[in-house]
Image (cartoon, rainbow, N blue to C red):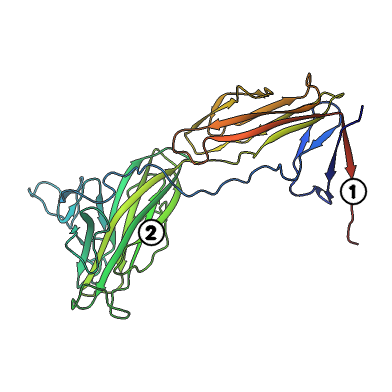
Amino acid sequence: MKRVSMILFVLLGAMGAAYGLVGMSAAMGEETAVLRADQTFAEPVNASCTGDNLLTNPSFEGEYTTYIMPPPGHPDCQTWNPDEPNQVCERAQMPEGWHPYWLPDGTEEWLIMPEYTDSTTDQVNPDRVRSGEKSMHYFSFFTRHEGGAYQQVTAVPGGRYCFSAYGHAWSARTDSDWYSDPDPDNGELYQKVGIDPTGGTDWESANIIWSDEREQYDFFDLFEVEAVAQANTVTVFIYSRPNLPVKHNDVYWDDASLIRDMVLTGLPTQLGLLADDDVPQTVTYTVNINLSAGLTWTASLDPMGAITPVLSAVSGGAGDNLTVTISSGGYPTGTYTTTLTIESAAGVIGSPAHIPVSLWVVEEVRHNFQPIIMRP
């Protein structure tokens, strides 16, 4: 009978096997089968955030009402009763779901609490609403401000969250039109967004992770930042500050989103075992399942597959790994395949993942080794 052989070329470097080849240690004896160069493990996917928006009223729609500050109130707000704290903030007309914050009146020269209100679709050239019927608008007139708005959202500790919002500003010394003045006649108005991964509401906290701040005049553009939750709540912030007290220091925000990034990454592109039909072998892989915090996964094999590897588990959670054991015992010469499917919840990037699993049983496994060539 003509013998069938498969020759494996193993390129060795000074630090071990060459880049691109993945070793498979056999459980029996000292034999090591090596996958071909096109059978490497996949690199983790660097995916951007996608999924359901977790914010309440992310587009700043609906009725804007007088904000009632929780006790003990704020000195820039009013009171209905001299015996009660100043809780009625008439200068803050706010949309549902959002809370104002600001540096108090007189804290710095020319600095005041901004006036919060809405902008509507009739305010055009340039447009002050990006989508829907309204945007959030706040401003300081011939003065400066430092502040914005925040919202707290329930979170999964360890989950990665992306916060973004579209913003722009109208900053000008005159109102000859509705566009900002060029430098040096604007207010040097800066905007940014942030996330407090601990869920706090202090906008001056060192815990907040801020985006880069920039001047964004007259047309909406995206501000975004990412953070890993450290508590059961995260807090998102929109922020602005003009440096100069020009006539118009107006800020507009629309179309905010907070998304928990749900990703399944780091899985191999395929698994396999190459074995001699006279020497049964077994190999066990540890599959590192990189999954966003709080999610679960399931593992299953194609019921029509020609082989049935042994799985250490059929389900698990973030941080749990899976072992897959392939054995050549009892298989005659030939090629046998199946598919391992790892799946998480709907909307998870990279799910479901389908991983080919192969067993090659040959009459002889012959190893060719090349000499190491080292530069003197």
Q: Is residue 223 above or below residue 179?
A: above
Left or right, 280 with reference to 74: right
Whether residue 25 is visible, yes or no, is yes
The residue wearing badge 2 is: 223
Q: Residue at x 29, y 48 (%)?
A: 58
Left or right, 1 with reference to 209: right
x and y percentages locating residue 71 in the rendered image: 20, 45
Q: Residue at x 18, y 78 (%)?
A: 176
Residue extending furthest bottom?
184
Residue 365 occupies which quadrant of the picture?
top right
Residue 364 occupies which quadrant of the picture?
top right
x and y percentages locating residue 8 in the rendered image: 84, 41
Pick the residue in front: 126 or 172.
126
Distance (Cα) linking label 1 and label 2? 54 Å
Q: Which mark is residue 165?
A: none
x and y percentages locating residue 200 in the rendered image: 35, 46
- Secondary structure of the residue carrying tag 1 is loop
Q: Residue at x 20, y 78 (%)?
A: 174
Q: Viewer-nearest of labels 1 and 2?
A: 1
Left or right, 292 with reference to 60: right
Q: Amino acid at mark 1?
A: Gln
In which quadrant will I find the N terminus? top right
Residue 260 occupies which quadrant of the picture?
top left
Query: Nearer the N terminus, badge 1 or badge 2?
Result: 2
Q: Amino acid at mark 2?
A: Phe
